[in-house]
Amino acid sequence: MANVTPLIESIAATLKQASTQSLDLSFNELLDMSENGELNITPDYQRLFRWTEGQRSRFIESLLLEMPVPPIFVIEEPDGTYQLIDGLQRISSYLHMRGKLSATHLDPPVVLGEFLTLSDCDIVPALNGLTFNDFPTALQIRLKRAFIRVEVVRKETDPRFKYHMFKRLNTGGELLSAQQLRNCTIRLLGPDFPDFLIRMSEVDDFRECTSGMTPARKLSAFDQELVLRFFALKNRRARFKHEVTDFLTEYMEEVADPLEAETFDFNVEEEVFRRTFTALRKALGDMSFAIAYKTRDKLTAGFGAYHYEAITIGLQSVLGRLDLNDESMIARLKDTLIAIKLDPVFIEMTTGGGKNSPGPLNDRIGFVERRLIDAFPG
């Protein structure tokens, strides 16, 4: 039998990194904590609330019937406040019932002061059509006093332990996009890089160039993933071997984690990012990542992810040579990019599935690089 002592010691050492506490709090206490700034749901995390009105209603019904509900998890910040890391759907449903929720991303949107009207309650149908203000006093008090177990990850806990804990908690339940999960989890290693990605996704030139993506993609934080793709491919393309999702996550982890060796000069990288999308906005605007469709002799408005990767990274080969105030140079860039997009070889490189591997990726980036270098020789 193998010596189990090292294994036991390894587990014991890891446990020392974790400090937790269990509390039973009423939903009314959680509401007060939210309003007083003691319970924090970051704006980007709040956008992940997506339960339907029926799901919200049935959760309220469960509370009124005193059914057991799963615990929520929070992280204690250095100032003693809590950051919610699991339980958003339940907390937000209660806030909506009390008229204390702002979720303008929903359809229909929810604004502060709007009370949830219960619907689809299937155990006590008489609840349907009622708001909190319609409840008799006894039911209002029962709902306010309904409690939930709150698992607190204390501030002394190692940041990496917090990070891996959040990843495990969010492998099921309400599905998040890969970038939404990165934004929430990697923030626990360090907030600077996640916040930087969000800020860059709001740059006007970037927004115009990527405006062809669908609203559903924007809601899933795909715009922020595109920013991450830009920096990951620009700086670490050689590391991309198999799965793009893992590649992006690993790069974001390395930049965000202060204990990792990866360095990221925020000022320099921001300047390159802004210059890239200023050039594209001036050349093609909202057609920057449009594709040639059907007739293949003109561009169709929309968004092609393969075009985004190839053009933004390929452009780096000549970015330093471009005078963005020279109209003739911008016109040449526009003509070159359109010619690239309409080239049958490039169309083949960027059409269909199965092209998210290193070989095809490098082929389409290389194609753009060669054409741009020919158009803008050093």
Image: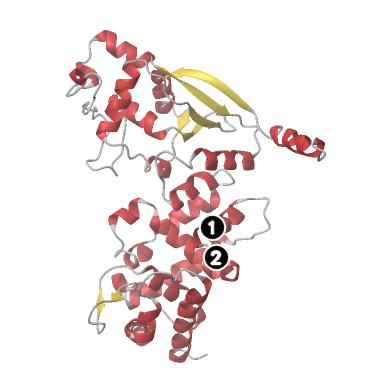
> Where is residue 101, by image quadrant?
top left
In the depicted structure, whether residue 345 falls above or below residue 59? below
Q: Position of residue 190 (x, y in %)?
A: 58, 47
Q: Secondary structure beneath disc 2?
A: loop
Dot 1, how many residues are within 10 Å of its Cα: few (below 14), some (14-19), or many (20+)? Answer: few
> Which residue reaches farthest top?
138
In the depicted structure, whether residue 27 falls above or below residue 153? above
Q: Position of residue 13 (x, y in %)?
A: 75, 35
> Where is residue 114, by image quadrant?
top left
Q: Amino acid at mark 2?
A: His
The count of marks equals 2
Q: Secondary structure beneath disc 1?
A: helix
Q: Is residue 357 visible?
A: yes
What residue is disc 1 on?
246
Q: Is residue 99 visible?
A: no
Q: Position of residue 201 (x, y in %)?
A: 41, 58
Are the residues tagged 2 and 1 within 8 Å (C-beta)?
A: yes
What residue is disc 2 on?
242
Horizontal placement of 293 versus 6: left or right? Answer: left
- Residue at image location 50% in from the left, 62% down from the top: 244
- Residue at image location 34% in from the left, 55% down from the top: 218
Q: Amino acid at mark 1?
A: Asp
- Residue at image location 34% in from the left, 78% down from the top: 283
- Residue at image location 29% in from the left, 26% down from the top: 58
> Which residue reaches farthest front?
1
> Where is residue 347, by image quadrant?
bottom left
Q: Position of residue 5 (x, y in %)?
A: 81, 35
